[in-house]
Image: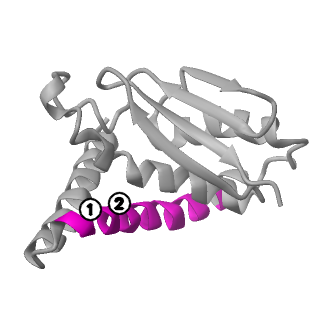
Amino acid sequence: MADDVLFEFLHMEMVSHIYKEQASRGEMDKDRATCVSALEGMGFRVGQGLIERFTKDSPSFKDDLDIMKFICKDFWINVFRKQIDNLRTNHQGTYVLQDNKFSLLTQLSSGKQYLEEAPKYLAYSCGLVRGALSNLGMDCVVTAEVSPMPSCKFQVVIQKI
């Protein structure tokens, strides 16, 4: 329980620090993308490291769907202390992971006034997923969208080479 709170506070401070640092430079309009990119990059590196640790004793995966099931169950439980609520796919390289009570959004009010602020709190998590999948050999793009707070959907699009 204490670990969860510490992770949530660390995450909130990372987001706050990145945005304050950019605001102090005075170019907030064009640097919003820079902030999201910095948070996503941090998450990417952490996701790569975590997936190495989590998969060191597991057998290799059969296909992309097997990898996504691992992400939704084992990876999500280890990072966010719960499974993904719903996994959907079109069987053509697009996966939608739905979390109805995303832990990094529960601290924000569920009112509509924070809905436009919510996406910046998802950039790090998108990086986590993309980094984990990258280390498992899947080049992809991960985006997130906030439905009613604190619910969110992560869309993973596999890049076929």
Q: Where is residue 16 in the image (x, y as percent from the top left)?
A: 17, 58
Q: Quadrant of the N terminus?
A: top left
1 and 2 marks in contact (CB < 8 Å): yes
Per the image, label 1 sits on a secondary structure element best described as helix
116 left or right, relative to 123 = left
125 left or right, relative to 15 = right
Q: In which quarter of the image is the C terminus?
A: bottom right
Query: Is residue 44 a member of the stretch shown in magenta?
Result: yes
Q: In this view, does 81 lie above or below 142?
A: above
Q: Distance between the residues labelled 1 and 2?
A: 6 Å
User: Which mark, residue 32?
Assistant: 1
Q: Where is residue 115 in the image (x, y as percent from the top left)?
A: 23, 32
- Residue in view at x 43 percent, y 60 percent: 40
Q: Which residue extends farthest front?
A: 29
10 Å crowding of disc 1: few (<14), some (14-19), many (20+): some
Q: In this view, does 81 lie above or below 131?
A: above
Seen from the viewer's position, the closer of residues 5 and 126 is 126
Task: From the image, state whether disc 1 or disc 2 is nearer to you.
Answer: 1
- Residue in view at x 22 percent, y 38 percent: 116
Q: What residue type is labelled 1?
A: Arg
Q: Tell me the magenta residue range.
A: 29-52
Q: In this figure, which residue is indicated by the disc labeled 2? A: 36
Query: Is residue 90 a member of the stretch shown in magenta?
Result: no
Seen from the viewer's position, the closer of residues 101 and 52 is 101
- Residue in view at x 21 percent, y 42 percent: 117
Q: Position of residue 62 (x, y in %)?
A: 91, 42
132 left or right, relative to 29 = right
Q: What residue type is labelled 2?
A: Val
